């Protein structure tokens, strides 16, 4: 409505009677309140892009002189008409009127409105590699609306969990709308927050896997009622539950009010998405019935379920296991065969039978681990053979968590079975269960395991109200315990707790889950004032180095993975609860940090910005292994994907793709429909062809209309 009001105000200047008639009709419509949540969607948001080179046609703002505080007049938008590079000046015309002027380029900042199409790229700003061949976690420094548009190109419909901790709208300048902090006396504070959230939730919906996924949103009492209705309207087919989490045992005292001790978490479950039963400690439930005497758990070696379980999903995990016909024991392990090869073409050694990961419906599946890992486990007795059924004989293995229970003495090895697998004594086994909607667990104390834990990693840095690491870990565990390769997105990343929690979950069960975090490099309101008085602006190195992403998020994640603080000293203290070990041990994970860039579509289409587009192609292909950053040779093939730019090198490209069994995506740079189709037909069946740069450009042109809502 506020946008409509602005348009009517402009119309009054030229057509007062028409404006009056329209106002009357608008007032009548406003009285017809639809059932549900109603709010004003406001002028579409805009974001400043400090550091981005000013180009002809750009929308810009004129910055105040250095040392001065921003005024309301500084919010005016201008369009660049011409640029004189020698004098470093630009001719401008005001948007909405005929005013024109010139300004120094150094005093201009480019502005992107959310209704404008963007053409994003990514530039790497560092990383940590300790996870071997695991997929990379990624952290993107960007305005989160534009980052979500970017992820729609790389991960549309593929995300298992989105966990967000959005601004709580306290009225204490804790978030911005359209480049301005929203304060407590803003009459439109709540509707601005709803408009802000709705735009992002509509994009988040497109990222989630509609068959089986969950959106988790934490909030406090300021907006939980409005948020609940917004979630119901945005995800009408979902199953929604709200949980109360005790995050401050000491409570926050408030005059004349009850002390505040908890906050809320909404779980928006799509499709088959439901919380899984997990092992809960005594802090969650009473001791009675919490444990029982049980055997060690043997898991099926063949990947079960539907997501990522087919041979074509992981060709490198489709290989034969040869069993001795007489004893039923494991005799040897074969190598993966090409995707286009028939399994019957493999000849089993004499007196053995070849077992393959054949699913119950007769289709070809894949194993959970590779042949090398299987060869390592077998001599230790960690592989167990089921009842003989020819090539579909069930085979079981012990996951890292179960092996740990042997090493810690929870289960004792009592002997060896005929197939070579170990036989263990019974041990105390934690019963798996689901908690109630009231979570009162010491591990969720945000002071002890949020703020104080963060100080252990970053002793000289402060971040307001970080989440308890273990609270985030528990929220995720209920939905990814049985998804070792889950993709988790957090687009209000803050201090980076979500990546930290996902890395710990991976350590606990040997998972390969990956997180994608988005955070901007915003500087707190009070600190901004001090920096501006010193003559600094956004984009200056001294300003950027104290922003959230550079000062908190990146160093926190680097410290958690490396086990070392920013000063190089080992982190003091131990992790607690589910998995206790020294923080200085670090975590065996890979992570890369990026900053979002804004590219010119013509340069992208002409293949002149490949270096910036390259990380998007890598992420879309799984963010695993080597990234192709240069195609000056005309083509290249990495671990999971390939890029073909010179169509005269097609045969070389095909040969290399055929040798890379895990390469499942082929990006082909061409403007010709027929050429692309002919190349696509020649690719192996398990390879998905993607046309560049049509798929990229079309994605962002389609998505540009959403920001006007």
Image: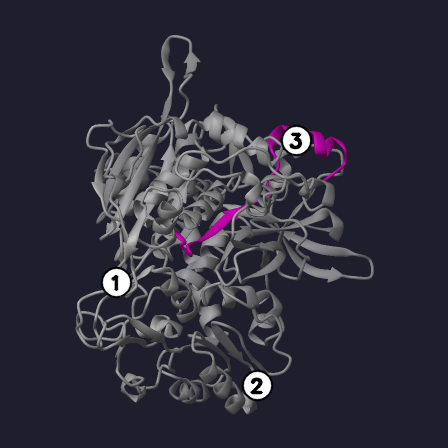
Nearer the observer: mark 2 or 3; the answer is: 3
Q: Which mark is residue 593?
A: none
Tell me where residue 645 appears, x and y as whole percent. 56, 82
Q: Which residue is mark 1?
A: 304
- Mark toward the start of the polypeptide (3 vs 1): 1
Judge whether 665 appears above or below 12 on screen. Answer: below
Residue 44 visible within the image: no
- Mark toward the start of the polypeptide (2 vs 3): 3
Tell me where residue 329 appears, x and y as whole percent. 27, 70
Judge whether 35 appears above or below 386 on screen. Answer: above
Is 192 on the left or on the right of 81, as rendered?
A: left
> Does the magenta-highlighted stretch encompass residue 520?
yes
- Give the position of the N terminus as an image quadrant: top left
Colour mode? one colour
Which type of secondary structure does the marked residue at label 1 adopt? loop
- Mark toward the start of the polypeptide (1 vs 2): 1
* Residue placed furthest toward the right: 86
CB contact under 8 Å: marks 1 and 2: no
Q: Residues within 10 Å of mark 3 (few under 14, many from 20)?
A: few
Tell me where residue 174 appears, x and y as whole percent. 51, 31
Nearer the observer: mark 1 or 2; the answer is: 1
Q: Which residues are magenta?
A: 509-537
Which type of secondary structure does the marked residue at label 3 adopt? loop
Is 239 on the left or on the right of 52, as rendered?
A: left
Q: Residues within 10 Å of mark 2 (few under 14, many from 20)?
A: some
> Does the magenta-highlighted stretch encompass residue 258?
no
Is 172 on the left or on the right of 482, as rendered?
A: right
Q: Quadrant of residue 224?
A: top left
Q: Nearer the viewer, residue 339 or 460?
A: 339
State how far apart marks 2 and 3 are (Cα). Answer: 51 Å
Q: Which residue is mark 2?
A: 646
Q: Which mark is residue 460?
A: 3
């Amino acid at each position: 409505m506020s946008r409509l009001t602005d348009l009517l105000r402009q119309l009054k200047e030229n057509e007062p009677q028409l404006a009056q008639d329209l106002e009357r009709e608008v007032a009548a419509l406003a009285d017809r309140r639809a059932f549900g949540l109603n709010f004003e969607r406001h002028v579409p948001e805009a974001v400043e892009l400090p550091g981005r080179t000013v180009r002809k046609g750009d929308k810009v703002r004129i910055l105040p002189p250095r040392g001065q505080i921003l005024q309301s007049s500084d919010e005016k938008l201008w369009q660049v008409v011409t640029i004189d590079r020698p004098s470093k000046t630009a001719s401008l015309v005001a948007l909405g009127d005929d005013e024109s002027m010139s300004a120094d380029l150094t005093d201009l900042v480019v502005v992107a409105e959310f209704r404008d199409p963007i053409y994003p790229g990514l530039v790497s700003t560092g990383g940590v590699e300790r996870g071997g061949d695991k997929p990379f976690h990624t952290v993107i420094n960007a305005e989160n609306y534009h980052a979500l548009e970017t992820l729609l190109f790389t991960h549309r419909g593929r995300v298992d969990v989105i966990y967000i901790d959005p601004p709580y709208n306290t009225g204490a300048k804790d978030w911005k709308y359209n480049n301005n902090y929203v304060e407590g006396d803003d009459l439109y504070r709540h509707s601005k927050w709803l408009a802000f959230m709705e735009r992002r939730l509509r994009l988040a919906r497109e990222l989630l896997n509609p068959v089986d996924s969950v959106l988790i949103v934490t909030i406090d009492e300021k907006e939980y009622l409005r948020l609940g209705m917004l979630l119901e309207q945005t995800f009408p087919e979902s199953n929604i539950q709200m949980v109360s989490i005790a995050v401050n045992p000491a409570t926050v005292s408030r005059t004349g009010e009850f002390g505040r001790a908890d906050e809320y978490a909404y779980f928006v479950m799509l499709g088959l998405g439901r919380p899984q039963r997990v092992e809960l400690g005594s802090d969650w439930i009473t001791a009675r019935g919490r444990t029982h005497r049980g055997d060690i758990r043997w898991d099926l070696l063949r990947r079960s379920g539907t997501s990522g379980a087919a041979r074509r999903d992981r060709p490198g995990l489709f290989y034969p296991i040869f069993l001795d016909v007489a004893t039923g024991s494991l005799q040897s392990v074969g190598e993966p065969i090409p995707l286009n090869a028939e399994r019957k073409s493999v000849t089993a050694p004499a007196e053995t039978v070849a077992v393959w990961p054949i699913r119950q419906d007769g289709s070809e599946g894949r194993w959970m681990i590779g042949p090398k890992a299987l060869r390592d486990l077998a001599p230790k007795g960690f592989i167990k053979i089921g009842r003989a059924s020819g090539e579909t004989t069930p085979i079981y293995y012990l996951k890292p968590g179960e092996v740990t229970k042997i090493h810690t003495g929870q289960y004792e090895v009592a002997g060896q079975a005929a197939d070579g697998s170990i036989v263990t004594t019974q041990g105390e086994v934690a019963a798996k269960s689901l908690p109630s909607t009231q979570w009162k667990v010491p591990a969720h104390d945000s002071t002890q395991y949020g703020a104080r834990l963060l100080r252990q990693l970053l002793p000289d840095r402060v971040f307001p109200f970080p989440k308890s690491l273990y609270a985030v870990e528990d929220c995720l565990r209920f939905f990814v315990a049985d998804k070792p390769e889950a993709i988790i997105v957090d687009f209000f990343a803050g201090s980076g707790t979500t990546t930290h929690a996902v890395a710990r979950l991976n350590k606990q069960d040997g998972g390969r889950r990956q997180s994608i975090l988005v955070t901007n490099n915003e500087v707190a309101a009070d600190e901004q004032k001090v920096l501006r008085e010193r003559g600094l602006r956004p984009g200056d190195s001294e300003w950027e180095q104290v922003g959230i992403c550079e000062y908190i998020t990146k160093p926190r994640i680097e410290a958690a993975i490396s086990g070392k603080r920013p000063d190089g000293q080992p982190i003091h203290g131990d992790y607690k609860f589910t998995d206790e070990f020294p923080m200085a041990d670090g975590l065996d994970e890979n992570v890369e940090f990026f900053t979002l860039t804004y590219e010119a579509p013509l340069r992208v289409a002409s293949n002149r910005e490949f270096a910036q587009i390259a990380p998007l192609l890598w992420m879309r292909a799984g963010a695993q292994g080597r990234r192709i950053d240069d195609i000056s040779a005309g083509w290249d093939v990495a671990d999971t994907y390939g890029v073909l730019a010179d169509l005269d090198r097609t045969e070389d490209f095909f040969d290399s793709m055929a040798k890379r069994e895990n390469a499942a995506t082929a990006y082909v740079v061409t403007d010709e429909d027929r050429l692309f189709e002919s190349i696509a037909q020649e690719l192996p069946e398990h390879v998905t062809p993607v046309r560049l740069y049509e798929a990229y450009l079309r994605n962002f042109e389609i998505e540009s209309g959403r920001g006007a809502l």
